[in-house]
Image (spheres, rainbow, N blue to C red):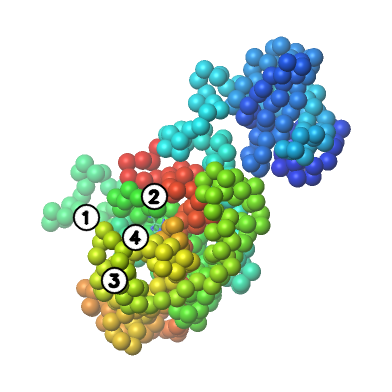
Amino acid sequence: MSELRRTPIKQLLSEGRAHPSVTVQGWVRTRRDSKGGFSFIELNDGSCLKNLQIIADHTLASWQELQAKIHTGACLEISGELIESEGKKQSVEMRAGELKVFGEADPEHYPLQKKFHSLEYLREIAHLRPRTNTIGAVMRVRSRLAYAVHQFFVDRGFIYLHTPIITSSDCEGAGEMFQVTTLDLDKPPRVDGAVDFKEDFFGEKTGLTVSGQLEGEIYAMALSLVYTFGPTFRAENSHTSRHLSEFWMIEPEMAFYDLENDMDLAEEFIKYLLGEVLEHCHDDLEFFNQRVDKNLLTTLAHVKDTPFEHIDYTKAVELLRKSNQKFEYAVEWGGHLQSEHERYLAETVFKKPVIIYDYPEKIKPFYMKMNQDGKTVRAMDVLLPRLGEIIGGSQREDDYEVLKSRFDAKGIDPKEYWWYLDLRRFGSAPHSGFGLGFERMVQFATGVENIRDVIPFPRFPKHAKF
Ligand code: ATP
Ligand code: MN
């Protein structure tokens, strides 16, 4: 294999040792010319938040010519001597020996000049925003979290499962589906006036998955512990700071787990993820702590170290109704809890994460296990301060007859779910699972306000450009 010339800047800064000759490659963040006959170049290669400071002496060969090309945004390769830095800001800096310009960035046109840019503006230049400190830091934290997700489950004996992205089963109640079709939208084939999906690519109506849960259950009934981690789609017209049309979800599904086991795993999972980023993403989190939320590090440590509160839905409604808080939506037993209610409980009442369980069956899907009271099901939501819901989960109904009656009660044709019923007919087992929205986790870990800024290319209503 041919050797790479480049040493990542992260490695040079963390080793902090002088070296007679190294090569770095990256993009210029700033250039500052000093009167003493040299220039300071701040180079960033994305391996870490920090830049490498490079000192270019104006006596360097062809400096005159290079100078005109070295601007913010230009891509360079620089070889030289690494020396221990006298400044406090960095451990080492480089004395340039040889400079090569890969690509210039005309300062007249390059949009990312030094001044501050709003995250809204940066969304419009999604092809350049990765070169900012904020988006760079978000993506490093995101990557570490994704790695930690796999570590967590693999360490606990879970099997990583890929569930389909195109599906003909909608996980009832989870959300509106995007349709997948190759039919001609101008003149689709019809029978008796209705579109004939038998003529469509798959011979039936299909869409993009809103959840891998039902397929996860199939595999949990053979492999015991499985998890999915993949893209999920919801065609909902939500314009909130917590909803995307395309997001990534982690869905573990566990045979032989009851709701208590499920809630414990959810809590352990969140704490583990926070522990991993606190340990491995220190510089990036420090940056967010300074720039985005002064309490970020304290909040993350608090959530990691504090046992979550557990209250049932009935108690939650009671607390909300007793409170003197003015809510936009009134609270009533049997209704959905809105984000304002969820945040009030986690932020104001308990000041820590709260798990609400045992929700009214009427507002929950067919697959959740019915409680003895005949009114509530074994559902749970994990609510975080500042964010609201991050996890939704449940123990699944494992009794064939009860499940069948649930289909009837909800007006669902059990024939459509014959395979799901089969799992209760052959070797049924108590089992549970949950779904964690990956971007909400990245939001929480970084303190970044809007979910559109924690995914490389956000998709939301009227927005799917690059
Ligand atoms: P919400 O009430 O916040 O809209 P939900 O109850 O519809 O969420 P679930 O079907 O329970 O969501 O999905 C499981 C998890 O997936 C949620 O707890 C959340 O973290 C995440 N999630 C759901 N919808 C979205 C979305 N549109 N964008 C990003 N994450 C989402
Ligand atoms: Mn939910």
From this viewpoint, which residue is outermost toward the top?
Answer: 64
In this rendered view, identify the residue nearer to me: 412 or 239: 239
Q: Quadrant of residue 11?
A: top right
- From the viewer's perspective, is residue 258 above or below residue 230? below
Q: Earlier in the sequence, mark 2 or mark 1?
A: 1
| 3 vs 1, front mark | 3
- From the viewer's perspective, is residue 383 above or below residue 127? below
Which quarter of the rendering shows the C terminus?
top left
Q: Earlier in the sequence, mark 2 or mark 4?
A: 2
Q: Quadrant of residue 25?
A: top right
Residue 251 in sight in this render:
no
- The residue at the point 46 percent across, 38 percent down is 119
| 2 vs 1, front mark | 2
Query: CB under 8 Å between callouts 3 and 4?
Result: no
Q: CA distance from mark 1 to mark 4?
A: 43 Å
Residue hosting label 1: 196
Disc 3: CA contacts within 10 A as few (<14), some (14-19) or many (>=20): some
Which quarter of the rendering shows the N terminus?
top right
Query: CB under 8 Å between callouts 2 and 4?
Result: no
Residue type for callout 3: Arg
In this rendered view, identify the residue nearer to me: 192 or 457: 457
On the image, the x and y values in percent for residue 199 come to: 26, 53
Residue type for callout 4: Glu
- Identify the disc placed on residue 340: 4
On the image, the x and y values in percent for residue 134 come to: 54, 41
- Identify the disc placed on residue 241: 2
Q: CA distance from mark 3 to mark 2?
A: 26 Å
Side of 329 where 240 appears, left or right: right
